[in-house]
Image (cartoon, rainbow, N blue to C red):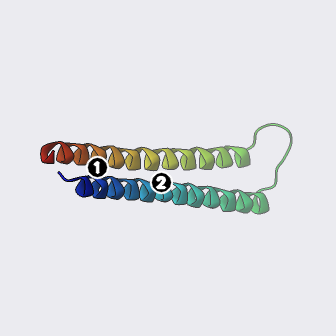
């Protein structure tokens, strides 16, 4: 493998990694925005009553938990993609050397 080809592979891998990180960030922002809007809707429609945990708080906690799981799943999936691409590029670079 020539030096130019090696740099090209590294550049493509770096671009892919940057794209994945941007996708993760966009997904996280979208999930947080959705939860924020959901909580605002709950606040408008279900009043907070008393000091003890209410059904309102249970619903909000469940929404936050769901958003956290979605973000974590997306992050793990995208990390897996990057790792697999990295392994493929490393194997390919090793064969061409």
User: Residue at 18% of width from left, 42% of height from top?
Assistant: 94
Residue 47 drawn at (x, y percent) = 81, 55
Q: Nearer the viewer, residue 21 or 55?
A: 21
Residue 32 drawn at (x, y percent) = 62, 55
- As drawn, which residue projects farthest toward the right? 50
When the figure is inspected, residue 62 is found, relative to residue 22, above or below; the finding is above
Residue linked to disc 2? 21
User: Residue at 13% of width from left, 44% of height from top?
Assistant: 95
Residue linked to disc 1? 85
When the figure is inspected, residue 75 is found, relative to residue 18, above or below; the finding is above
Q: State which quadrant residue 57 falls in.
A: top right
How many marks the image carries: the answer is 2
Q: Nearer the viewer, residue 76 or 97?
A: 97
User: Residue at 56% of width from left, 45% of height from top?
Assistant: 68
Mark closest to the chain's N terminus, 1 or 2: 2
Under circle 1, the secondary element is: helix
Marks 1 and 2, Cα distance to the nearest angstrom? 14 Å
Q: Residues within 10 Å of mark 1 (few under 14, many from 20)?
A: some
């Amino acid at each position: 493998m020539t030096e130019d080809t090696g740099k090209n592979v590294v550049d493509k891998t770096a671009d892919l990694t940057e794209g994945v990180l941007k996708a993760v960030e966009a997904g996280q922002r979208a999930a947080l925005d959705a939860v924020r809007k959901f909580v605002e809707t709950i606040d408008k429609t279900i009043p907070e009553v008393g000091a003890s945990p209410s059904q309102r708080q249970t619903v909000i906690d469940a929404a936050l938990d769901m958003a956290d799981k979605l973000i974590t799943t997306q992050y793990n999936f995208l990390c897996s993609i990057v790792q697999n691409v990295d392994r493929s590029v490393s194997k390919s670079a090793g064969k061409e050397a």
